[in-house]
Amino acid sequence: MTSYLVRSSKGQIKIQEMAFVLVALMIFFSVAIIFYISLNSADRKDKVLEQRENEVLETLRKLADSPELRWSDSHEECNGCIDLDKAILLKDPQRNQQVRALWNMGALSLEVISPSRTGECSIGNYPLCKTITLINSTIGSRIQYEGAFVSLCWREQQSRICEIGKIIGSPKELR
Amino acid sequence: MKNSKGQEEVVGFVVIVVLVAVVFVLMLGFSPKEPIVKENASKDIRHFLESLRVYTTDCRLSEQVPLEYKGLIGSCYSGRVCLSGKKACDVLNSTTNDILTKSFPNGKDYPIKGVRFNIYYNESTGSESNIASLSQGNCSTSHRSAEDFFPLGLGQVTVSLKICY
């Protein structure tokens, strides 16, 4: 009777050990899976952010390719080139209103990066200026501005002068 | 005796399950990442290189037209001198340095820690020669890069830019 009881309790202890090991393994693998999923979701968040940034850049580049801004010359093809002569004319209030309605953006400006320039462009100081602001209806907003590299070109006598710049824009803020 | 055999079988089964689970977790961890993401991330650098190609430089070979960056690379490769008396390669180096500093401000206090820029000429025979190289800041961290190509003579020019974060 006694020996049966001893054997039975030994067996129970072994089964308990096995159960503990299994539970520990379950916990270990659930922690590993949770860790993997959290890493993966963080990676996915980064990918989504990157994708959004790329979408904004592509939209801005498409805008740079629109007939209102694009450098058009039958002799020279220029990818991502903006005609600053056209852009400065869009600052005229009447044309500017049409452009605002057409593009429906919160902000849109062109900025020369190289060579170094300063000041907002006007007919008086063009082309030796830094920024041409076409739309600016989001002053004080928290919307982040994005910029895509473009070539900012104008005509000087018979040649084309191009500088490195950015087209900077943001969507309209929701009210 | 029967009981201990049964227990051994259970232990063996548990070991197999554990091994399969470990292999599964390792496979998940080391699954290859999509290379497309890197390509997308370099879009803005590619746009920059496209703009750089048509940038008007200070070098003139004739009175009328100033050279574009692309033309300046060709002039540097063939060892020409600008009307100002400066060597085309010197103008290429100073122009590149100036543009990169303004377009990608870098250093310890900036999000961009360093920049690596190279221009190579790949001849039709397959040999490669360096036209210009420029290095700013530290580039041992993560990076994004892009390349631009255009034909020159019988070969091809490769312009590469690496931005380090």
Image: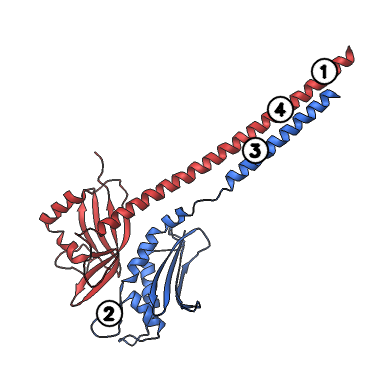
Badges 2 and 1: C-beta atoms under 8 Å apart?
Answer: no
- Residue with the most extreme left position: A94
Decide: few, some or many residues near mark 3? Use Cα within 10 Å; few <14, some 14-19, many ≥20: few
Q: Give the mark, 4 or 1, whose residue is nearer the N terminus.
A: 1
The residues tagged by marks 2 and 4 sit, at their Cα atoms, a distance apart of: 80 Å
Q: Residue A109 appears at what percent x and percent y? A: 24, 57
Q: Residue B161 appears at what percent x and percent y? A: 43, 66
Q: Which residue is mark 2?
A: B66
**Residue A20: mark:** 4
Q: Which chain contains the residue that carries disc 3?
A: B
Q: Which residue is mark 3?
A: B21
The residues tagged by marks 4 and 1 sit, at their Cα atoms, a distance apart of: 18 Å
Q: Which residue is mark 1?
A: A8
Q: Is residue B51 left or right of residue B110?
A: left
Q: Which chain is red?
A: A
Q: Which chain contains the residue that carries disc 4?
A: A
* Residue at figure coordinates x 18%, y 50% from the top left: A102
Q: Which chain contains the residue that carries disc 2?
A: B
Tally of numbered discs: 4
* Residue at figure coordinates x 64%, y 31% from the top left: A26
Q: Is residue A137 left or right of residue A46?
A: left
